[in-house]
Amino acid sequence: GPARHNLDALQRFQTAPLLPFAVCSTLENYTEKLLASGVEIPETQGESDFVFEGCYTTQDAIKRENRAGENLLSNADTLTALAGLDKREQLSQAWRTVCFNQFHDIFDGSGIHEVYADSTKDFEKISATAKDASDEALSVLHAGLEAGTIAVTNPLGWEQSSWVTVAGMTGEGAVQLTGCHGHEAIGQYGKAGLGFAATVPAYDTVSYKVGESVDAGELAFCETFAPTDNRN
């Protein structure tokens, strides 16, 4: 609502020449007088603002790109630190761009069209910077692992079990996989490649070796829930 200096200014304006007369009121009083006047009230369909399009519906792309950029850079920060690489200059600039696009006249959807065209270009640069740093870090972290194995890195500060897809790895049916840390998993070949559920300790890199084929009859359906779900 208005502060005291706003109310004082409103009182001064009442005596100033060439300024419209204004008073403090309520939405109820305004609506009652408007309806009582008998004026025809227009009906509006579609976008109400032709300059800041999306201001009322919000721009979903900028929010999606912001979250993706934060996640990509957070992972890149962690991976480069684990690998002992100094990528602060490149990543800091990318973080500044992410933070710049969080400005309230951009992030809430009230910018003009060109703003969001620019923010999408910014995200492409952010994504490329994070990918370059992450790929270089992963090449360091995966060095020395046994040839022919599948390397999986967890950039989070807690043990993570997630689905991994090795793109381009072809085969048929199900296979046994064994991690260098003793974890065993069943993998399944599909159109996207070999998929399996890997479990990796916090801030660690492990390798999985593909073993013998597994009879599909030995596979059993198992429900899984979020870690906070008490059905586990």
Image (cartoon, rainbow, N blue to C red):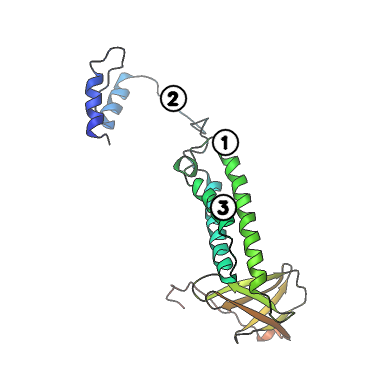
* Amino acid beneath label 1: His
On screen, residue 13 above or below 68: above
Q: What is the secondary structure assignment of the residue under circle 2? A: loop
Kindly indicate the quadrant of the structure image that contains residue 71: bottom right
Considering only order in the chain, which callout, 3 or 1, is on the residue closer to the N terminus?
3
Q: Are marks 3 and 2 in contact (CB under 8 Å)?
A: no
Q: Which mark is residue 94?
A: 3
On screen, residue 67 above or below 79: above
Q: Which mark is residue 113?
A: 1
Could you say where residue 225 lies in the image, as x and y percent from the top left?
Answer: 50, 73
- Where the N terminus falls, by quadrant? top left
Q: Are marks 1 and 3 in contact (CB under 8 Å)?
A: no
Q: Residue at x 63, y 50 (%)?
A: 125
How crowded is the residue under tag 2: few (<14 C-alpha within 10 Å), some, or many (20+)?
few
Could you say where residue 51 lies in the image, as x and y percent from the top left?
Answer: 52, 30
Kindly indicate the quadrant of the structure image that contains residue 76: bottom right
Mark toward the viewer: 2 or 1: 1
Could you say where residue 129 lies in the image, as x and y percent from the top left?
Answer: 62, 56
Q: CA distance from mark 1 to mark 3?
A: 22 Å
Out of 97 and 161, give the one closest to the viewer.
Answer: 97
Out of 99 and 223, give the one closest to the viewer.
Answer: 99
Q: Is residue 115 left or right of residue 28?
A: right
Q: Are marks 2 and 1 in contact (CB under 8 Å)?
A: no
Q: CA distance from mark 3 to mark 2?
A: 47 Å
Residue tagged 2: 42
